[in-house]
Amino acid sequence: MTRSTPAFRPATDLTWEKTAPGVRRTLIAYNDDLLLVKIEFEAGAVGTLHHHAHSQISYVESGEFTVTVGEETRILHAGDSFYAAPNVPHSVMARQAGTLLDSFSPLREDFLPPSK
């Protein structure tokens, strides 16, 4: 069974989920091979250090973040991006309120809502 969002998805159709203090996310689009997520952070909010089996590319849409990937930490601004290879620990902290666009391959099953 192939899972995917519709070909077109207006922003008004997106639903938000609170994932941590000061952090919320919405699934923009996905299929079995790829997932795009928008995550909004209040200033000071943290995406805790974690790792997963998925490749992740993140784009800083707005704000300023301290980002750690593996042993390296950098400050990223709007327009910057980072790559976290599978199983490499990574984290973010919003120095200013901002938004990340995270893409994952393959699909992160744990992000999907429970099936009905």
Image (cartoon, rainbow, N blue to C red):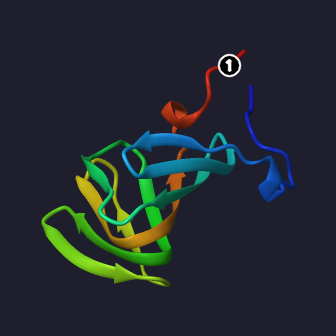
State the image coordinates of residue 9 (x, y, percent, origin top left).
83, 53
Identify the image quadrant of residue 15. Answer: top right
Looking at the image, which is closer to me, 104 or 33?
104
In the image, residue 34 above or below residue 83: above
User: Does the rendering let one see residue 107?
Assistant: no
Vertical relation: 74 (above or below) 30: below
Q: Residue at x 49, y 41 (%)?
A: 18
- Observer-nearest residue: 81 or 77? 77
Residue 46 drawn at (x, y percent): 30, 55
Q: Amino acid at mark 1?
A: Ser
Q: Residue furthest left?
A: 71
> In the displayed structure, would residue 92 be above or below residue 77?
above
Judge whether residue 114 can be spotted in this image.
yes
Residue sitting at x 36%, y 45% = 21
Residue in view at x 51 percent, y 56 percent: 39
Q: Position of residue 29 (x, y in %)?
A: 70, 51
* Residue 11, image quadrant: bottom right
Horizontal side of 9 relative to 85 (left or right) equals right
Please identify the residue farthest to the top as the structure is shown.
116
In the displayed structure, does residue 65 sit left or right of residue 49? Answer: right
Specify the quadrant that holds the N terminus.
top right
Left or right side of 16 for 46: left
Please tell me which residue is depicted at 61% across the width and 48% down the height of the picture. Answer: 26
| Front residue of this view, candidates 60 and 90 | 60
Vertical side of 79 occupied by 106: above or below: above
Where is mark 1, residue-wise? 115
Q: Secondary structure at mark 1?
A: loop
Q: Where is residue 116 drawn, in percent x and y?
A: 72, 15
Quick one: label 1, few (<14), some, or many (20+) residues within 10 Å?
few
